Image (cartoon, rainbow, N blue to C red):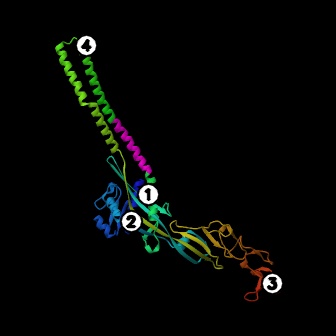
Amino acid sequence: MKELAELKEFTANFFKNLGAKTIWEGQMLRVDKVPKDFEDFFGKKSPLKLVFDRSEEGKDTELIAKGSFLLKAIALYLENKGQTTLLKLRVMDPKELLKHKVVFNDCDIFSFEKKHSYKTMVRFTFLTTFQYLNEKEQKMISIYLEEGKPVTFDEKRFQFEEGRKEDIEISGIKENYSTSKVILKELLKPQVADIGTNLKSKLSRELQRIDSHYKRQEEEIDKQVQSLNTQLKELEDPNSKVDKKNAELKLKRINEQLQKITEEDKKSKLKKEKDFLLNDEVQKHGLNMDTKLLNTTVIYYPVYECRMLLKNNEVIGKPLDFLYDSKESSFTSINCESCKESLSSLKLCSSGHVICKSCILPCKGCTQGSCKICQFRRCNRCEREYCKRCTKKCSRCFKEFCKTHVIPTSPTKVLCLGCSGNF
């Protein structure tokens, strides 16, 4: 099942990288708008309907399976191309993505600035052929390297577009290729070990069969020689009852047979035959591996440095700085300014602090609320606590009062009820 999944992924990615349009219709992959050079190479125009099970093969479908013509065509096409493909991730605007990931309670994005730089990784796609006995297996493996280290990357999560050379500087391909070969060797070890164990078991049985066969033949020769020597002793015995004339004839015949066995050196010939067959079986049960680099792809993606300001009806918050990694589809944490916990839902307090719901402190004068960072102020008249936006300082006695217990005397000044004479 894993090999089938890898085969489907490889095929879909191959046509995506060509710039074709791929659509899964159940277990069938429909490929439209295939570039003309591959159509000419393959000898068939798109759309292509690709299936991965022989039971689903039909008149208007193409089978992708071990040994299939299209799979061989893909491998040969990639081998002949011998080029480095450049792909760019299509990514969602970080501002829009943030709106999907974070809940803004009673506030909105007032301004959003971003600047980006690109990061790159390299994908090496290898085709390894295992050949042994009458079997031939092929395995395709894609290895992703970023900053010279292997990374896990699920291409199915993304869409791609053709990259531009002027966007990035391509370097380190040779070094990454050397690293990828080392990684590939480690990835192939389990399969090589499994095949090796299977071959060793089969070889052991064949060697045992050959050894037993020639051992029986050698035993038959020994028995024949032993029988002839026994007959010879009986005939040479003075007390033998065989008449002399018959004895001489028998002796002559037996000696001729023994001489023939000696001259023909049958056991030596059998040993040579046996050694030849044993060596032949060892050769047959050997594993031949051939690995080809089918494609090198440089994939690059933006990393954004973002600065955001939030605003509600009363206040604009301070700038929030964070990063957005488009490959990981993740933002660096935006933390509550009060408890420092990471935020998935945020709010502005009356002073503009970005806080979580747990850190909101109710204000008696507004629904905006305050937070633990802010200092509540007590009205010197009603003695209730208010946020700083809901209190005013009397311009005469300089004490704090809630808005209910002051009287404006100018656009910027107020008097408390006591100082204004309105008790």
Read off the residue under disc 1: 181
Q: Amino acid at mark 4?
A: Asp
Q: Are marks 1 and 3 in contact (CB under 8 Å)?
A: no
Q: Residue at x 29, y 26 (%)?
A: 222
Q: Amino acid at mark 1?
A: Lys
SS for dot 3: helix
Please check the rendered image and state whether residue 202 is part of the magenta-colored stretch, yes or no: yes
Q: Residue at x 39, y 42 (%)?
A: 200
Question: Of label 1 and label 2, which has the lower sequence position?
Answer: 2
* Left or right: 339 in relation to 176: right
SS for dot 1: helix
| Disc number lying in front (1 or 3) | 1
Q: Amino acid at mark 2?
A: Ile
Q: Are marks 1 and 2 in contact (CB under 8 Å)?
A: no
Question: Of label 1 and label 3, which has the lower sequence position?
Answer: 1
**Is 3 placed above or below 338 here?**
above
Residue 334 position, x and y percent, is 61, 69
| Disc number lying in front (1 or 4) | 4
Read off the residue under disc 4: 237
Question: Of label 3 and label 2, which has the lower sequence position?
Answer: 2
Marker disc for residue 23:
2
In the image, the segment drawn in magenta is: 189-209
Residue 101 position, x and y percent, is 56, 68
Q: Residue at x 78, y 80 (%)?
A: 401
Residue furthest bottom in the image? 410
Query: Could you tell me how far apart the alpha carbons at marks 1 and 2 are, in whole angstroms?
Result: 32 Å
Question: Of label 2 and label 4, which has the lower sequence position?
Answer: 2
Query: Could you tell me how far apart the alpha carbons at marks 3 and 2 are, in whole angstroms?
Result: 75 Å
- Of 84 and 162, the residue lying toward us: 84
| Disc number lying in front (3 or 4) | 4
* Left or right: 93 in relation to 104: left
